[in-house]
Image: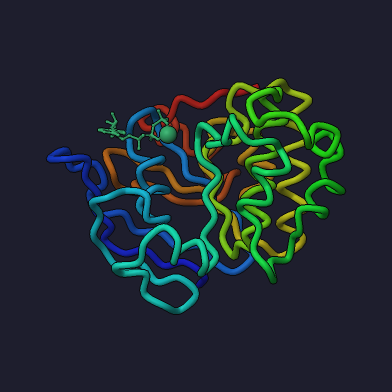
Amino acid sequence: MLLEVRNLHGWYGKSHVLQGVDLDVGFGETVALLGRNGVGKTTTMKALTGVLSRAKGEILFDGSSTDGLEVHALAKMGMALVPEHRGIFASLTVEENLRLAARNGAGWTVQDVFTAFPEIERRKKNPGDKLSGGEQQLLSIGRALVTGPKLLLLDEPTEGLAPVIVDKLVQLIEQLKDGGLSILLVEQSIEVCLKVADRLLVMDHGRIVWQGTGPELLAAEEVRNRYLTLEMA
Ligand SMILES: Nc1ncnc2c1ncn2[C@@H]1O[C@H](COP(=O)(O)OP(=O)(O)OP(=O)(O)O)[C@@H](O)[C@H]1O
Ligand SMILES: [Mg+2]
């Protein structure tokens, strides 16, 4: 396994949000994390990447414990978060946003990102905030790729995007999978999950309460009714 998480707890102040999360992501696997608003999906991503200031549990990443490591060290090990609100620096240009994140030896260079996403290259001198939602999402993913991730953590990448852009993102995720990248994906659209995820996890109240494949989730009506508000396209 690339990522093994056992009994992960996380807090915001006194509020105990993650209450013993267990999850695994295999090498080359795409795992989708589902659940209603506020159950702890984003907090899980933050805890894994060191952004959450108070977390506790066992996390093995590529065979090493991540205990005590901070955001930078975790990024260097190959954890790359594409946050819910994309986290682009508005005052920097598109190109600067990428160069700031880029690391020598990563599989992806800034030029590779431009080649893969010509719509971003066309805007490379524009400020980061002068992009459409879809372009910002591509830039945010590009920024994660140039860090040289082993695990890409995508938090609701398709949220608020037009269907044609969603289709493009699905294709991109499929390409990244084909390239061998492992992905942990928070995603509300069951359609997107069915297309890209090898395994689905359902979260409720800070724990994983169900796991299975896409077709298994489609068949598990009770699980869907109880734990999910899925958008069926
Ligand atoms: N910065 C914060 N400070 C305090 N509480 C927070 C903070 N961020 C989130 N929470 C609370 O923690 C819980 C889990 O939030 P989280 O953002 O992880 O949910 P989520 O599953 O990602 O939901 P959504 O689908 O809305 O993105 C919620 O009750 C939320 O209100
Ligand atoms: Mg969230």
Which residue occupies the foreground of this view, 198 or 14?
14
The residue under the point 50% across, 72% down is 1
Percent across and percent down for residue 183 are 59, 55
The residue under the point 61% across, 53% down is 101
In the displayed structure, 125 sits above or below 26; it is above
**Quarter of the picture for ligand 2?**
top left
230 on left or right of 125 = left
Which residue occupies the foreground of this view, 150 or 50?
50
Which residue occupies the foreground of this view, 228 or 58?
58
The residue under the point 34% across, 46% down is 209
In the displayed structure, 45 sits above or below 230; it is below
Percent across and percent down for residue 159 are 58, 27
The residue under the point 86% across, 33% down is 122
116 on left or right of 169 = right
Quadrant in the picture for residue 92: top right
Give the quarter of the figure containing the C terminus.
top right
In the displayed orientation, state which residue is furthest to the left. Answer: 14
7 on left or right of 33 = left
Percent across and percent down for residue 169 are 72, 38
Which residue occupies the foreground of this view, 156 or 131?
131
